[in-house]
Amino acid sequence: MGMTITEKILAKAAGKEEVLPGDNIWVNANVLMTHDVCGPGTIGVFKREFGEDAKVWDKDSVIIIPDHYIFTEDEKCHRNVDALSVFVKEQGLTYFYEPGTDTYSGVCHVTLPEKGHCRPGEVLFGTDSHTCTHGALGEFSTGIGNTDAGFVMGTGKLLIKVPESIKFIIDGKLSANVSAKDIILKIIGDVGVDGATYCAMEFAGSTIDALSIEERMTICNMAIEAGGKSGIIAADAKTIDYVQSKTDKPFECFESDGDAKYRAVYNYRAEDLKPVVAMPYSPDNVKPVSEVTDSKIDRSYIGSCTGGKIVDFIMAAKVLSGNKVKVPTFIVPATVEVETALVTEMVDGKTLRAIFEDAGCEPIAPPSCAACLGGPLDTFGRCNTTEICISTTNRNFPGRMGSKDSQTILASPLTAAASALTGYITAYEC
Ligand code: SF4
C-alpha cells in the first residue's frame, strides 16, 4: 500500500522500507531546537541521565535559540539565558543565537528556516509546541517535552509512534482579504481543538501551492491548535528554491503516494473562504468576521511566529498605509531579519516602518516572542488588565497574552490591521 509523506520521512529516519500508523519506531533526529523557556530543563534532564561531563550527540545539530523572555528586567529570565550560554560554551555548540550579540535572531520558528536549519525530508524536534511550523518545508517537525529532548540531546534518537494522517485539500483562488491564517482558523473551527489529536495534518491543493513559504508556515504552525502531532506540506520548486537560498546541505523531497491511506480527507474551495477570527477562549471558537463586527477591541497586536513574518507585515502595511489607528497597535517583528526588512520592503512607495509610524502604531519592538506568551509584567504589548486584544498570534486560552482578565481574538494580519483602524473587529475592505 502507498505511504503518506509523513510515513515516508519517518521510515527513512528509522532506516526502514515502510512504516504504518501506530508503529512505534526509533527515529534519528536531524535537528533538536530548544529555547530559553525549556532549554535549562532539557539540559538538566540531559545531565541527570547522561552525566555531568556528557557531550551532546552532535554539536552542529543542537540549535539554541533564546527568544521568549529577552527584553525584560526580570532576573529569573536572564538566568535562563545565562544557563544556555554556559552550556553552549561547555559543549562547543555551533549554533547559538545569543541575546545581546550579533548572532541574536528572535523567534525560534522563524529563525530556524531563515538560518537554513529546516530541510525537506528531515526530522526536526523542538521543545516548543509550535515546532510543527517547519512541516511547511516538507519535513517531519514536532514539539517534544524536556524529558524527550534531554534524551535526543544525548543520543540523537527518539522513540515515536507513527501518526495517522489527515489530508486537507484547498483548491482555488483566495479573495484579497483572506489569507493563510483564515484557512487554518477555518480548519481548526471545523475539526475542533482535538480534531486531529496525534495526527499529521497534511495540506495540499492549488491554494496551498500558490502560498509563499512564510504563509505555509502560518498554516503548519497552528496544526497543534487542532491537536496535531505535525503539519506538513510537500516540498515544491518554491520550497527547494527557498531552502537552497539558505543552506548548501543536501536534502531529499518526499510526497504522498496516490493510494496512501488517510484517517479523513477534507476538501475546501478557496472561493468559499471568508475572513474569520477565533474568539476567546479557544482557537476553535471561530466566527466569520461578518458576524462579530459589533465586538469592540482595545488593542491590536501584530507579531509572533504565526503573524510576525515579513509577509504578515506587508499585509498589515497595505491596510494601514495612509490611515490612522484608533487603538494601541503593537508591531513585533519575529526576527532581526524581519526587522531589517521593515526598512527595505515598500508598500505604496513607503517603507513598512514608515507606514506603521505614520499610522500611529506604538514604537516598533525589538524581535522576540514578546506578549504572545504573556511573559513578565514589563513585556512589550503584554495585556496586564482587562484588554481585549485582536492578535495575529496562535493561541487564545485565558491569560495567554498576560492577565487572565484579558481576552485574545485570533486573526489574520489583514483583519488585525483593519480592526486597528476602527476599534472593532473588521475585515479588510479590498
Ligand atoms: S511567538 Fe508565541 S507561539 Fe511562537 S514560539 Fe514565541 S511564544 Fe511560542
Image (spheres, rainbow, N blue to C red):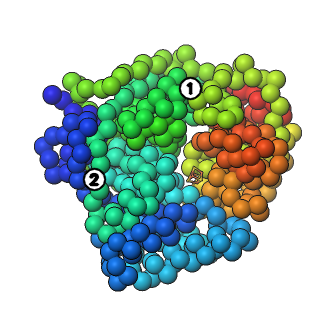
Identify which residue is drawn at 44% across, 23% down: 170
Image quadrant where residue 348 sits: top right
User: Crowdedness of circle 2 by 10 Å Cα count: few (<14), some, many (20+)?
Assistant: some
Q: What is the CA distance from the residue labelled 2 to the residue labelled 1?
A: 31 Å
* Contact (Cβ within 8 Å) of mark 2 with mark 1: no
Q: Is residue 187 above or below residue 10?
A: above
Q: Which residue is mark 1?
A: 189
Q: Position of residue 384 (x, y in %)?
A: 80, 52
Q: Is residue 410 above or below residue 114?
A: above
**In the rendered structure, which amino acid carries the disc numbered 2?**
Leu
From the viewer's perspective, tell me whether residue 89 is left or right of residue 236. Answer: right
For residue 362, the mark is: none
Query: Which one is nearer the viewer's eye here, 52 or 7?
Result: 52
Q: Quadrant of the N terminus?
A: top left
Closer to the N terminus: mark 2 or mark 1? 2
Q: Position of residue 144 (x, y in %)?
A: 42, 53
**In the rendered structure, which amino acid carries the disc numbered 1?**
Gly
Q: Which residue is mark 2?
A: 159
